[in-house]
Image (spheres, coloured by chain):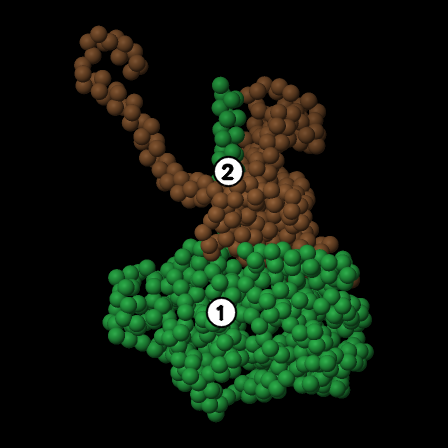
Chain colours: A green, B brown
Amino acid sequence: MKKSTKKGILATALTLMMVTSAACGNNGGNNSTNTPADSTAPSDTAASNNGGAASNDEKVTLTIAWWGSQPRHDATLKALDQALHPNVTFQTQFSGWDGYFDKLAVQYSAKNAPDIIQMDAAYVNDYAGRGLLADLKDLDVANMDSATVDGGKVNGTLYAMPLGVAALGMVYDKTVVEKLDLTAPTFGWSWDDLFAFGEAAKAKLGKDKYVMVDQSADLVDYTSYQYSQGKGYIFDAEGNFAIDKATWINYMTKMGELRQKGILTPADITTTDKELDPQLDSVINGTAVLRHTFSNQVSAMEALKPGAFGFASMPKGTEAGGWLKPSMFWSVNAQSKHQAEAIEFVDWFINNEEAGKTLGLQRGTPVSSKVVAAIEPSFSDADKVSLDFLSKVTPDAQPFINDPKGWGTFKNDYKTVVEKLQFDQSTPEEAYEELMKVAAKYAEEAKK
Amino acid sequence: MNNAAIKETAGSVKLGQVKKIRSKRWETPVTGYLFLSPWLIGFLLLTLGPMIMSLYYSFTDYSLLAAPNWVGFDNYKQIFTDDDVFPKSLKITITFVLLTVPLRLMFALCIAMLLNRKMKGMSFYRTMVYFPSLIGTSIAVSILWKNIFSRNGFINDFLGIFGIKGPAWIADPKYALGTLIILMVWQFGSSMIIFLAGLKQIPTDLYEASSVDGAGKFRQFVSVTLPMLSPIILFNAVQTMINTFQMFTQSFVITNGGPVKSTFVYVMYLYEEAFTKFHMGYASALAWILLILIGLFAAVLFGTSKYWVFYENQGGKK
């Protein structure tokens, strides 16, 4: 009896532990914060029916979420303090880009997503297509370029308000280029110029420094290359995947050569490179000289190393490689109980000149021409560089298209496929086949 | 005593007394359940409920943002027939488990034996060795690990002193999984504590008797310590095996499954399907397969235990 009891207890304890810990183990560190929307329940119906908090004395708490770097957090928090309305208080959830959309999905499934959500072009179609975003037709968009506003529309309805425009281009370490007496990259340089710059710079940099961060696993880089070769966007008008086989293999072969020559960063440095991270960004920490960037990141880079950087366009082929994109959007949660207040806030955010002054160019150049005119006199040097960057890319910018519905996470799988090339585990032809297999899965799912 | 008293007065028991006895009989389990209730309620609401939900979701196409539709065994069928990632992540996970569990147990046992000596200030050493386990085995330690093993981290600086150029531990597919294994082995605190308690349970007369018989230290370890400790080893093996199968934080924080998916363990895959791609139904099916898999491994451990686990009161039956 004694021995069986002892054995029995052990077995039972282990079984229970196994069952409980195996099943409930992992929720992946995505702790959603509490929802303040519920605490103001009595005012809900009143507030949303009379079309705004302005005529309502009830206290309203709006949850607002965004991603970004420290200067953007600081500016946004300051702007929120300038509160548009004494009855509205904000609860903020801000973070870096990593995990932002994972968390948002979990919050939506738990029905406690923020009222106001910073949205990215990759996900607008996914979220709007599932009916999770509110119609923003009540926003005042009189002072905005209609093409820009259209960037936030899905089937003609405005679900995401563009907050700024950013241009794709490149950043280089000016101090290194000057010290080594190299011909600096320019706006309007070509792929041949870039290759020549690579050879010349590598010869002077030596073994342990590299010319360019290997961003070939970033879909942005190839997209720009395909544009520059005159082969159009990577999705056709119907949202079908349209990577040109010969162009892709050419590009990857060329990148492989550059990697071999030590012009591109080697794979083990590439995998730990993290854009805009003070320690891990290879251009900021001095491991490499050149990488692609967006014009709205200028001030974040300047903040880390003032005056050290110069900017250039993406290289040209037969056409330009850069484009303008809405840097990010505000969307309003369709499940929110305070949609009217949330929309009123977004309206204030994009149209109010005081708000514009506080926010600066942290989300790209503001879309309202009135706001731009008001804040222009107070531009910092970094702002001027950013604006100059934008205006130089604008004339021959390629069209920007939001990722089709269902393709929001495609760039993660793309990265995995190209990583194999970086680590020499695959050839461009094999990688192309693998990529097509992945794309076929996405296409199949997008049809559902 | 009480029983005897009742028997004696069996014929002339007063009504009140019967009632008292009966109510006592009923009272006991209720009180027991009452004391259990905090755990029981937590188990039912936070564990059993979600488990049943996830079993249900595994038969649906639940996408996190839209309502679930019943699809029968489609998810399971797809996992086993049309999924390239599943076998890969499973292979990585099983490799990880098979290497981590024995290494961690050996390491924990060695440390426990070192700490089981009689020495001045031993309780201080025990505290210091267990200390890392107190600061948590999760995010903070993972970030620390990421820094220590980074290109210009502590380890490579240290190797540099001897003129060795260390590899890119976490950025090279050849070394990344190994680096995570070292981390898991290093997080030995809880197993070590249990071993230490087990070592203290071993009667000293066994050691005295064996040394009288002329057994050396090694002989004592093989013939006394290991058999006496075998139930504890089984317990630790099963517990470590479960933990290792569920490894997520380390891979998520340190390598994010990379480079080239070399540390893309099973639970990372599950997480990606669930929260990045919104395939909650599919991910639920993956979770249930993991549960069954852990069950199988545990069954193997228990199945073999009769050949190597020794229970004192079994009288040394082989």
Q: Chain of mark 1?
A: A
Label 1 vs 2, first from the N-terminus: 2
Query: What's the distance in space between the residues labelled 1 and 2, CA to CA?
Result: 47 Å
Numbered disc 2: secondary structure? helix
Q: Quadrant of the C terminus of chain A?
A: bottom right
Name the residue: 31% across, 30% down.
B30
Residue beneath the point at 56% across and 27% down: B203
Which residue was labeled with disc 2? A19
Q: Nearer the viewer, residue A244 or A259?
A: A244
- The foreground one among B127 and A164 is A164
Kindly identify which residue carries mark 1: A155
- Residue A255's place in the image compared with B209, above or below, is below
Q: Is residue B267 above or below residue B255?
A: above
Question: Within 10 Å of the Cα at label 1, are there few (<14), some (14-19), or many (20+) other Cα atoms?
Answer: few
What amino acid is at disc 1?
Asn
Q: Is residue A125 left or right of residue A174?
A: left
Q: Quadrant of residue A407?
A: bottom right
Find residue A277 and report its horizontal and vertical position in percent: 59, 70
The quadrant where residue A343 appears: bottom left
x, y (%) of residue B144? Answer: 59, 59
Going by the numbered disc 2, the residue's amino acid type is: Val
**At which x and y percent is residue A158?**
45, 72
Inspect this view and state whether residue A368 appears.
yes
**Dot 2 crowding, Cα within 10 Å, few <14, some 14–19, many 20+:** some
